[in-house]
């Protein structure tokens, strides 16, 4: 009963605070009505019924060029990759027929299948593969290829990658780099791409729609759906388009997903798309980052404060109260991924949280509900990007729960620009989640602390963790790499997890939610990474009308 009442209290608090955000979001969605009208026009074309689909998502790519990051972390759709993930997050061959690693861990050899062609009819060769990775490395976009020393085509179907050091995440990187045609690559490629994937590029109207057609000459499983129109809409505009029957699939929000709409069903996809607090580990001693931003927080620098928050938060209650139950408890940056350590899971334990504080000398001497130590009140600020109702709701719900152990968290919305300046000295409601363990390296390796890239603003630095992370990166087998990724989280005594140093208080993995027209099968979805738009399309070639 106490838990139900607590949930009701949090929901009532959130309802009032989020009402303004929802109203503003609905008003902003009016600007996207022209996209809905465009969808109606497109679906009136000559394509046979049940051979096309209209999908509404919220994020539009900046380019369709894999060398500029297109497809990184997902699938490039138009381009093929050497290898790819299956639904169990295991590697499968795509353009590659086989591959091998030499004994040094620095030389990878890939052999290509001989029947792959680009949509302009030209064969895919090892020269195209070498050109792709050389171009991607030179671009220095979102793909980290600093470890790639050389790539060369030995013959039409054999390509050799030479690395400067053993790099276990090389295959994860390869799985997200679409192969481009050297003969058809120019400055406009990102707006008019040629590829060898299951989909052909047809048309792109920026800020409106992207149209793809099935590649009938694809070497793999040719899509049964022949035309895909992807429209870019805010979630509220997409919801209106679903109500009007103008789209077949639409990304939606937890605040809208409890609505039933005739002719549609809700697809709920579990994810590793996490939300949690980053908490500065150092005291405020006047230090600043290279960009001149202040470092440190005198409250969150205490490990007992961070751990007490971690144990006080009822993650299931936050998921229910803040996100209508469309989330699951989160305990790390990579829950249920193959390299995750199962012992990072902790149980909610308010009594233990209070004991952690009391044993460290925190007490509420003046009776104001906030514990203190040496005259310092356990109060600090957590930031979130304004307009992000999910992060706001999760932060508010968690802050409400933490009050019961005597810690006051002030939740503040601000711009990304302001957040980037304050994230080294304030807590942040942050989100990550990837199909690549390299993310853990970026989040916790000591040299990444206090940079402007959002990965390690809390300043986690540990020689022991660095050793595990380095061993994971340099491992010659997947099993050895996974074991070291796990040890970095928890080695039985310490680590990056919440019962260790606790630089993060992980709270929930948000479900990705989509309204799907009845009769459309969107297949078995992989566990989605951060970002709910492009992960939906990873298996687009397997969608079908039934």
Image (cartoon, rainbow, N blue to C red):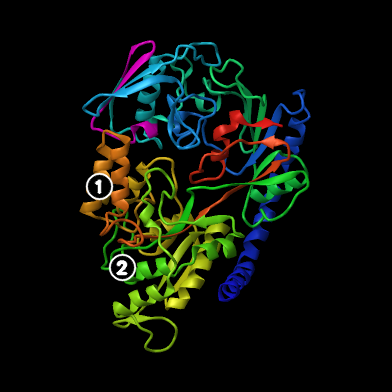
Disc 2 + disc 1, Cβ < 8 Å: no
In which quadrant is the N terminus drawn? bottom right
Closest to the observer, 236 or 519: 519
Q: Residue furthest bottom?
A: 366
- Point 47% across, 56% down: residue: 275
Q: Is residue 31 magenta?
A: no
Q: Is residue 512 left or right of residue 74?
A: right
- Point 29% across, 50% down: residue: 488
Q: Is residue 164 magenta?
A: yes
Q: Is residue 221 left or right of residue 418?
A: right
Q: Which residue lies under the disc numbered 1?
A: 468
Which disc is residue 5 wearing? none
Locate residue 152, reporting x and y percent: 31, 17
Above or below 487: residue 395: below
Locate residue 301, reporting x and y percent: 31, 67
> Which class describes the residues within 10 Å of circle 1: few (<14), some (14-19), or many (20+)?
many
Q: CA distance from mark 2 to mark 1?
A: 21 Å
Above or below 140: residue 9: below
Question: What stretch of residues is rendered in magenta?
Answer: 152-173
In which quadrant is the C terminus drawn? top right
Residue 188 visible somewhere in the drawing: no
Q: Is residue 326 left or right of residue 401?
A: right
> How many numbered circles does the render carry?
2
- Point 54% across, 34% down: residue: 538
Is disc 1 placed on a helix, strand or loop? helix
Above or below 425: residue 36: above
Question: Where, by quadrant of the figure, is residue 405 drawn?
Answer: bottom left
Q: Which residue lies under the disc numbered 2?
A: 303
Q: Earlier in the sequence, mark 2 or mark 1?
A: 2
Locate residue 101, reporting x and y percent: 29, 25
């Amino acid at each position: 009963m106490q838990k139900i009442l607590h949930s009701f209290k949090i929901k009532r608090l959130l309802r009032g605070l989020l009402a303004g955000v929802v109203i503003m979001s609905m008003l902003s969605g009016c600007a996207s009505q022209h996209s809905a009208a465009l969808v109606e026009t497109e679906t009136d074309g000559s394509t046979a019924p049940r051979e096309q689909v209209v999908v509404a998502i919220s994020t539009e790519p900046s380019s369709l060029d894999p060398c500029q990051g297109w497809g990184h972390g997902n699938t490039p759709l138009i381009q093929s990759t050497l290898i790819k993930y299956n639904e169990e997050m295991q590697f499968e061959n795509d353009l590659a027929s086989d591959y091998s690693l030499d004994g040094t861990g620095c030389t990878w050899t890939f052999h290509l299948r001989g029947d792959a062609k680009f949509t302009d009819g030209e064969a895919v060769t090892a020269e195209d593969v070498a050109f792709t990775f050389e171009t991607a490395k030179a671009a220095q976009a979102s793909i980290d290829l600093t470890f790639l020393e050389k790539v060369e085509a030995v013959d039409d179907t054999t390509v050799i990658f030479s690395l400067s050091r053993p790099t276990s995440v090389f295959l994860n990187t390869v799985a997200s780099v679409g192969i481009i045609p050297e003969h058809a690559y120019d400055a406009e490629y990102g707006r008019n791409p040629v590829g060898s994937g299951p989909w052909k590029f047809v048309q792109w109207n920026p800020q409106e729609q992207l149209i793809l057609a099935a590649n009938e000459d694809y070497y793999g499983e040719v899509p049964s759906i022949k035309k895909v129109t992807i429209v870019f809409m805010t979630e509220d505009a997409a919801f209106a388009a679903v109500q009007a029957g103008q789209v077949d699939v639409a990304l939606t929000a937890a605040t809208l997903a409890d609505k039933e709409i005739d002719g549609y069903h809700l697809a709920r996809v579990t994810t590793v798309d996490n939300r949690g607090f980053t908490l500065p580990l150092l005291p405020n001693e006047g230090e600043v980052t290279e960009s001149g931003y202040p470092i440190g927080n005198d409250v969150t620098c205490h490990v007992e404060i961070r751990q007490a928050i971690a144990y006080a938060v009822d993650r299931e209650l936050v998921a229910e109260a803040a996100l209508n139950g469309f989330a699951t408890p989160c305990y790390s940056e990579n829950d249920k991924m193959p390299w995750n350590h199962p012992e990072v899971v902790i149980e909610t334990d308010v009594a233990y949280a209070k004991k952690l504080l009391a044993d460290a000398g925190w007490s509420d001497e003046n009776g104001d509900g906030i514990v203190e130590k040496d005259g310092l009140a356990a109060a600090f600020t957590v930031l979130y990007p304004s307009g992000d109702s999910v992060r706001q709701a999760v932060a508010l719900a968690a802050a409400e729960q933490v009050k019961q152990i005597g810690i006051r968290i002030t939740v503040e919305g601000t711009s990304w620009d302001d957040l980037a300046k304050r994230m080294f000295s304030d807590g942040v409601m942050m989100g990550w989640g990837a199909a690549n363990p390299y993310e853990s390296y970026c989040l916790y390796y000591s040299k990444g602390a206090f940079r402007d890239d959002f990965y390690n603003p809390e300043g986690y630095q540990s020689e022991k963790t660095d050793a595990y992370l380095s061993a994971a990166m340099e491992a010659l087998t997947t099993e050895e790499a996974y074991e070291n990724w796990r040890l970095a989280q928890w080695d039985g005594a310490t680590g990056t997890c919440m019962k260790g140093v606790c630089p993060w208080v992980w709270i929930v993995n948000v479900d990705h939610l989509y309204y799907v027209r009845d009769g459309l099968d969107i297949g078995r979805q992989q566990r989605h990474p951060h970002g709910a738009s492009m992960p939906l399309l990873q298996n687009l070639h397997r969608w079908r009308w039934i």
